[in-house]
Image: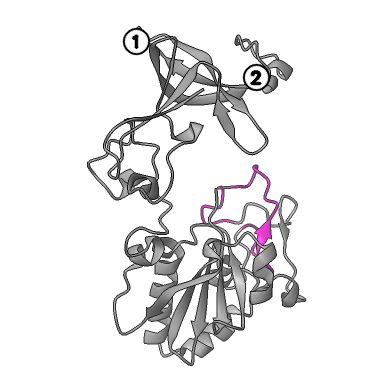
Amino acid sequence: MSTRGAIAVGNLRHWRGVYNHFDSYPTGLGATLYEHLMQRMLEGKTLAEIGADILCFDDWRNYLHGGICEYCGKMTGQAHSISGSILGKRRGKYPDPKAKHHSHQSLENLDEVQFTQNDLADSDLEWVYILNSTSECIHVLSVRERRKHVGDLRFDVTPDFGKMECGEKFERCHHYAWNHFPEIDQNGPQGRLGTRQYLGLAPVNSREDAFAFETKGRRYLRTGSGVHGDYARRCRLAIPMPDPAAWYEEVVGQNGQRFYLAVARAGRREHTPYPGVTWIFPPTKANPVETMRHG
């Protein structure tokens, strides 16, 4: 999934900004934005002037392209609704000069496409970067943490984008644990654990956390492929799934044979272990032994 964000101008109480679709976390967009601002300021631009330039556009990508659409070459808003027939076929040329296979946002009323602090509750933004020319810094907001101000990027010290993103003690980290702990085999039992789960900061008790299932005294390793029984029935999948209310996981037995096993009852809010099935969870740094949840 895309990590959506915004680059804004203002302060922590009042700001306006443009949208960014991909990689908006601090080690992605945060680092890119910081480098861009440093370069523009070395060229003689002030932070206020750069912010004013950004707010002339509807989208961070469109700002970087100077308002020139990369698909048709027109001076316009950000391209969207892009047909697969032209996607990825730029290579120095405009693959759709007549704009028959993509559309654009309008630049006539930027108020309708830019974001402010009042839009956060109904948006899917995850990170916001606010250029504050008075404080000469970039305020960083983590929207998924109730719009928490997690710190400032300043130009007189080298930022630690990793700590900005994950927290001093990984308290807001959303990476897999193996991203921070090289001793973890990402293909092993702990490979699906998040960093916070590995450190005991988040629970390890859902079906998705299990690496194996046990039933009738036999253990089966999970492969990662699963399907709801009712979906399999409606799609007439050629897989034996007799219970339409169950969630089935592909597992592999000791003989290497793969098959689908009913492992959970799919409720409205969560899955619970299927009768007679035990979910097996891997050891963590906080709890170095396997744990189980019984059906």
Mark 2 to mark 1 CA distance (whole Å): 25 Å
- On screen, residue 31 above or below 155: above
Which residue is disc 2 drawn over?
229
Looking at the image, which is closer to me, 251 or 42?
251
Report the amino acid beneath label 2. Answer: Gly
Task: Give residue 160's quadrant in the image.
Answer: bottom left
Which residue is farthest left?
183
Near mark 2 (Cα within 10 A), the count class, few <14, some 14-19 or many ≥20, is: many
Q: Earlier in the sequence, mark 2 or mark 1?
A: 2
Q: Which mark is residue 128?
A: none
Q: Is residue 116 visible?
A: no
Left or right: 14, with 216 as reference point = right
Residue 76 inside the magenta-drawn segment: yes
Q: Is residue 239 visible?
A: yes
Which residue is disc 1 drawn over? 254
Secondary structure mostly taken by the magenta-highlighted segment of the chain = loop
Q: Residue at x 43, y 52 (%)?
A: 174
> Which element type, helix, strand or loop, lies under badge 2?
helix
**How is the protein colored in the picture?**
one colour
State whether residue 287 is above or below residue 170: above
Res 186 quadrant in image: top left
User: Does 159 lie within the magenta span?
Assistant: no
Q: Secondary structure at mark 1?
A: loop
Residue in the foreground of this view, choosing between 228 and 162: 228
Q: Residue at x 63, y 59 (%)?
A: 124
Q: What percent of the width, then of the height, locates residue 93?
A: 57, 56
Indicate the amino acid at tag 1: Gln
- Please indicate whether residue 175 sits to the left or right of residue 69 in the image: left
Quadrant of res 52: bottom right
Query: Residue 173, how many percent across, how many down?
Result: 40, 55
Residue at the (48%, 34%) spot, across then down: 208
Q: Which residues are magenta?
A: 71-93
